[in-house]
Amino acid sequence: MEKILIIEDDIHISQMLCELLGQNGYEPIAAYSGTEALLILPQGGFSLILLDLMLPGKTGEEVLAEIRTNLTTPVIVITARTDKETTTQLLRAGADDYLAKPFDNNELLARIDVQLRRSTPQVPDASQLSHKNLILDTDAFDALVGDKKAGLSKREYELLHLMMSHPNKVFTKNNLYESVWGGEFFGDDNTINVHISKLRGKLNAISPDMDYIQTVWGIGFKMSE
């Protein structure tokens, strides 16, 4: 049974989430403050974390930062703050997804399922993919620009792997989201844009004069010719 840590200070929401997850085959563990969550996390074995932002003790942003110093566990932020600046900062800080309060229970379960499926280790493609001076390291799940590692995150690697597998194809944001995140695209460009921007930044930091990913305006992205 997969354990999910619920970090939520509202006791009614926490109890509702515990019941919902328990009824759907998960083992929920509740923490009611950021400080308590950081004491529970070292127990290990969590498959996913549901994180509220407005917490007593350490804030949700502080908890997320500490999680990302040591763990790659998927984190879904549940927040009442849905302005683009906040959501962009969350994704840049390492959140895998976010859901606005009040939320639909079925949508939450679907997003949990997507994150758990995406975090399941997969056998890498044995074939070597290359583009210009860029080589995809399918053993390390990273990219080499010349002889330097790019240090890609899991999502960045998967986006690059998908586009390099079909270098002449223009991928819509819908294509990218459904292939990499494994769920239905709800029309939120922010998730795709942030990850493509970070991917470009890491590649260009090593080879600033080389363009690897092309934006096809009004459609999506492809590998640059």
Image: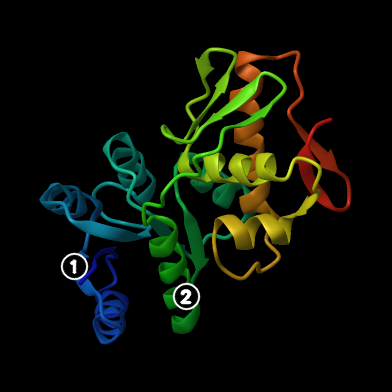
- Quadrant containing the N terminus is bottom left
Classify mark 2: residues with Cα within 10 Å, few (<14), some (14-19) or many (20+). Answer: few
* Residue identified by numbered label 2: 110
Disc 1 secondary structure class: strand
Residue nearer the viewer, 177 or 50: 177
Q: Residue at x 42, y 70 (%)?
A: 113
In the figure, 203 relative to 119: above or below? Answer: above
Residue that extends furthest to the bottom in the rendered view of this protein? 23
The local secondary structure at tag 2 comes to helix
Measured as percent of width and height from the top left, residue 103 is found at 49, 77
Above or below residue 140? Residue 8 is: below
Q: Tag 2: residue type? A: Ala
Residue 29: image tag: 1
Mark nearer the N terminus (1 vs 2)? 1
Kind of residue at badge 1: Ile
Q: How many numbered marks, from 0 up?
A: 2
Question: Could one spot residue 53 in this view of the protein?
Answer: no
Residue 18: quarter of image: bottom left
Q: Residue at x 61, y 59 (%)?
A: 179
Q: Nearer the viewer, residue 85 or 22?
A: 22
Is any part of residue 218 visible from this angle?
yes
Classify 92 as above or below 115: above
Residue depicted at 49% across the width and 60% down the height? 98
Q: If the image is split into quadrants, where does the C terminus sit?
A: top right
Residue 100 coordinates in the image, percent (x, y): 52, 68
Question: In the picture provided, is 170 more to the left or to the right than 208?
Answer: right
Residue at 49% across, 40% down: 126
Q: Position of residue 92 (x, y in %)?
A: 52, 40
